[in-house]
Image (spheres, helix red, strand yellow):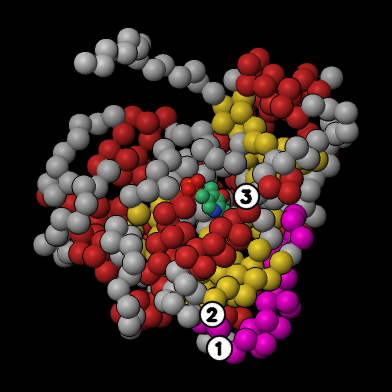
Amino acid sequence: MIAAPQVSPFTPPRRTLMGPGPSDVYPEVLLAQARPTVGHLDPLFVAMMDELKALLQYAFQTQNEMTMAVSAPGSAGMETCFVNLVEPGDKVIVCRNGVFGERMRQNVVRCRGEAVVLDFDWGKPVDPAVVEAALKEHPDARFLAFVHAETSTGALSDAQTLCRLAREHDCLSIVDAVTSLGGVELRVDDWGIDAIYSGSQKCLSCVPGLSPVSFGPRAVAKLKARGTEVQSWFLDQTLVMGYWSGAGKRAYHHTAPVNALYALHESLRLLANEGLENAWQRHAAMHQELRAGLERLGLEFVVAEAHRLPQLNAVYIPTGVEDAAVRNRLLQNYNLEIGAGLGALAGKAWRIGLMGYGARRENVALCLKAMEEVLR
Ligand SMILES: *Cc1c(COP(=O)(O)O)cnc(C)c1O
């Protein structure tokens, strides 16, 4: 016998989460998750799933039938788009201006697609002129893949223009909206986005572990026309949709994360109550307050103002200041988490998130007060 470990219940402290995600979770969402678990084929749960789909369609601004939440984090949403759509030999133009563009490239390679990588400086948006030239140079490309809101740098790319270019060159667009959904303007149908994925724990302020995904008609047609089976059984959308859109006859695919879906339902309901445009506006307003305070402290932004994400503020660490010591003191003394730099910005920048429920005045005030005292 292996002896039973003696452990106490885990009682986390109440932190203020102002990093790159997870963000502060709405109190209502935490309560929703604690409600009684029902069977995932229970008629009441199925009715909740129908509402959840309508709420996701609202958040994405789409009428796409194939709109659902993958039962896994944002990375699984990314993988869902690539494994379902990219077939061996398909050429994919991948824009890389941070960590997540590189992950898209790795997904293409694992699907045995051919990745044509376009590199942009970290902290800069994807340049549509470079993308247009690449689309002309590669008329056989089937996809254009890019990150709308690059969480590793805080740069926002022009998804509307990029998706229009993809369409003009007969490419399907695959868009990473993990950090953008709910935080900045995003219109899937108006912008002609073909496949998009997001995450529950950034600007939706839900618990981590779910990934909203939506496929438009052109993506669905590509999926249906596949000559090979989707290599992942779990992420195969043709199987999953039997569960999400059974029209009264839902079939078992996997056990839905019932309580996590209550949480997503509640966070999307709160977003719908606030109104998408109001949420975008609130993120912008809180960003302006934080920006003014950070600049008073002498901190400089990584991204130029025109391309800055309100929900992810990357600032350079002043010379002579010890990165980890500052973040540790914020955590110990103020229960405040901010993000470290990632990839090329590791040790060089901090990433301060203003995501979802976290984008509010008291968080901005706490962050500025704590940073001022710790940096002094
Ligand atoms: C966080 C993030 C992901 C990955 O999401 P996980 O939930 O951590 O798997 C992907 N893309 C971007 C832009 C992100 O910010």
Relative to 102, residue 162 above or below: below
**Which structural element holds mark 3?**
loop
- Residue of label 2: 91
Q: Position of residue 41 (x, y in %)?
A: 13, 49
Q: Nearer the viewer, mark 2 or mark 3?
A: 2
Q: Is mark 3 within 8 Å of ligand 1?
A: yes
Relative side of 315 to 102, left or right: right
The residue under label 1 is which amino acid type? Asp
Q: Is residue 49 magenta?
A: no
* Mark 2 or 1, nearer chain start: 2
Q: Which residues are magenta?
A: 121-142
Relative side of 195 to 180, left or right: left
Measuring 75% from the left and 37% from the top, which residue is drawn there? 347
**Which structural element holds mark 2?**
strand
**Nearer to the camera, 41 or 310:** 41
Q: Position of residue 189 (x, y in %)?
A: 46, 72
The residue under label 3 is which amino acid type? Thr
Determine whether label 2 and label 3 are within 8 Å by CB.
Answer: no
How many marks can you see?
3
Whole-Å distance between the Cαs marked 2 and 1?
7 Å
- Residue of label 3: 151
Give me the disc on residue 140. Answer: 1
Q: Quadrant of the N terminus?
A: top left
Whole-Å distance between the Cαs marked 1 and 3?
30 Å
Measuring 29% from the left and 57% from the top, which residue is drawn there? 234
